[in-house]
Image: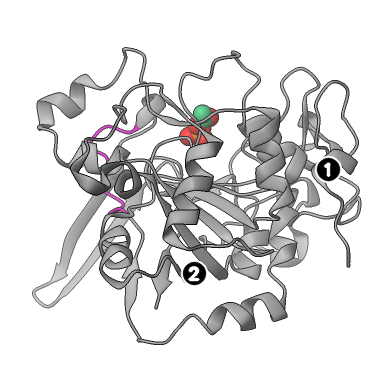
Amino acid sequence: RKLPTFDELPHFHNYSGCAWDVWGKDDELGTINLLTEDVVKNAAGEIKLGKCISLNWPINFPERPFYKRQTPIINSWRKSDVVNDDSISINTQSGSQWDGLKHYGIAEHKVFYNNTPSDALYRGHVSIPDPEKVNPEMMKLGIHNWAKHGICGRGVLVDLVSYFESGGSPLPYDPWSSHSVELKDILACAKKQGVEFRLGDILILRVGFIRRYSSSSLEERLSFHGKPETFAGLEQTEDMKRFLWNNHFAAVASDQPALERYPPPQGPLHLHQTLLPLFGMPIGELFDLEALAKFCAESGRYTFFFSSWPLNILGGVASPPNAAAYF
Ligand code: UVW
């Protein structure tokens, strides 16, 4: 089936790249639809060594989540001398995470993916004593859709840190500044790594945020907040949107807190408002790519089988990714 190009997609008011007609008006998977059995089967051919690498930061990190989100509350207790339990309470977006389709809409028009009005989305206490009586409003655009399908396919790491630092040069930007990561650098990096993108790839960008974070003192980490928080990442340009759509990535993730640079230059109109409500494309944030980058550099292989199983939260907004790369 031939997918429309970015320039063939209709506009939604003055927003380019509206993909609502691509998978039908009732669709709740978005670009995860690209992860067909054939795509997953081909991606499985990447597993040759049996080497598995986790891409998850511990749920306990960071010490102080960004955008004033709740710090994870984790308790364990002894039930008897030989039995322990624990409990956790987290904001699903405090650390490594997928932003789901219920996370972000278009503010000006109060709509989410597939023209879902903001008022049609349920927010509130979720209690499901009887699975037969699940409220359809509560389920709309929930993260459970991706949790049931899985986010599995070919992962491609574009390691901008190694690209810029090869030959002993320092990284030409501070990952804790609002530097704009340019498309030409992504393309040059992929070319240097010998990578060609395929339909359904999960694109993973390493911009250096977690490395910077891990090599900073606790004092520096805590002082990062409230300046406002600034970090390097993608910028919403027509070329960037065209690149992300025309390569037909199933999802895009990075090692920083928003994928895009922050604060965005145009105020509230930023890449989140294209990727989630218009493309239906998952945004991965704060993926821990350090071990992956090391192995890719050693092996010279930047493609791998990628698997991620978000938590199956009925009607959930977001989730830790539970993601891994397999070589
Ligand atoms: C932004 O909205 C920029 O980030 P997050 O997805 O963490 O809310």
Q: Secondary structure at mark 2?
A: strand
Residue 106 vertical position relative to residue 22 in the rendered view, above or below:
above
The x, y position of residue 134, in whole percent, is 74, 57
Q: Quadrant of the N terminus?
A: bottom right
Prevailing secondary structure class for the magenta stretch in the rendered image: loop
User: Total number of numbered labels?
Assistant: 2
Q: Secondary structure at mark 1?
A: helix
Tag shown at residue 114: 1
The residue closer to the viewer here, 315 or 43, is 43
Residue located at (32% from left, 31% from top)? 175
The x, y position of residue 298, in whole percent, is 25, 68
Instruction: Measure how far apart labels 1 and 2 are at the Cα level.
Output: 27 Å
Residue located at (76% from left, 38% from top)? 278
In the picture, residue 116 is in which quadrant? top right
Q: Is residue 45 left or right of residue 51?
A: right
Amino acid residing under circle 2 = Phe
Q: Which residue is mark 2?
A: 306
Provide the residue span drawn in magenta.
57-65
Residue located at (39% from left, 30% from top)? 69
**How is colour applied across the structure in the image?**
one colour
Q: Which is more foreground, mark 1 or mark 2?
A: 2
Amino acid residing under circle 1 = Asn
Label located before the other in sequence (1 or 2): 1
Residue located at (60% from left, 14% from top)? 266
**Magenta segment includes 235:** no
Residue 107 shows in this picture: yes
Q: Is residue 152 left or right of residue 161?
A: right
Mark 1 vs 2: CB contact within 8 A: no
The x, y position of residue 73, in whole percent, is 28, 44
Q: Is residue 12 left or right of residue 41?
A: right
Residue 30 vertical position relative to residue 110 in the rendered view, above or below:
below
